[in-house]
Image: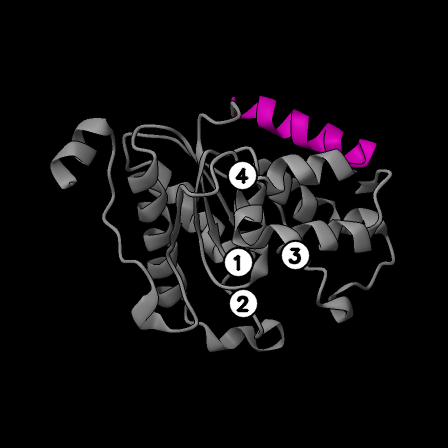
Amino acid sequence: MILNNVTNSRLMFYLYRLGKDYEFIFRDLFYSVFEPSPPVAKLVKEKMISVNLVPGKFSTSQYRAFYAIEHKKDMKQELELMQKSRNALNCASKLQPGDPIFFASDSQIAVKFAQNMSKTTGRKILTFDGDNEALHLDKKYQWKSGNVSDFYPTFVDLLIMAEAKCMSHGVGGYGRFANLLSIDVSCVIRHDNENPRRAAICSWLDDAKDAREYW
């Protein structure tokens, strides 16, 4: 990301003065301060065009499967990964019935589940193929090559999620950050939570008619 002519300290001062209301101006403020580096911006544009994603006309489902356990991934069973992926997608379908859903996860099992689920529903679930799981910035030991471009997919996913109107996100700050950058910060469901009893449990909705019947 490229920093424009505002210092980090001044930005944090503005957010502090705004209090909770900062959520509703965060997107505009962020993009007035930062802009994606040219390679990242190019990838975001190309990927959105490749799957016909239109800003504001899709929802996002983000599932952070290995939050705080990146070095203990075997703790998560495949069944749990698939169940939580399904719920994450269900919640996104509830927020924006009928529109496409962009799904992002740090688990390849979760991504493949979303791809398979897309074949059984009446609406598009979109993912981007990749051989490697997303590399998160807070886990430096995962970065072996020294190539900055290894982090591009993480930023590309973030900035594509930011173009959604509504969002279903889970644990950790990555999904929450994408929600703050999104077009409608109030259109959000927390499908996963550190406290399981506070996580939303959702049913799949194909279209607006299903939504009216559901509600």
- For this orientation, the residue located farthest to the front is 17
Position in image of residue 200 (x %, y %): 30, 58
Disc 3 and disc 2: Cα gap in Å? 31 Å
Classified by dominant secondary structure, the portion drawn in magenta counts as helix
Circle 1 residue: 107
Say which mark, if any, is on residue 182.
4
Circle 2 residue: 66
In reply to whether residue 111 is colored magenta, the answer given is no
Q: Earlier in the sequence, mark 3 or mark 2?
A: 3
Tag 4: residue type? Ser
Residue 97 in the image: above or below residue 89 = above
The image quadrant that residue 47 belongs to is top right
The residue under the point 44% across, 25% down is 57
Tag 2: residue type? Phe
Magenta segment boundaries in residue numbering? 35-52
| Front in this rendered view, residue 57 or 142 | 57
Circle 3 residue: 16
Question: What secondary structure is found at the residue carrying circle 3?
Answer: helix
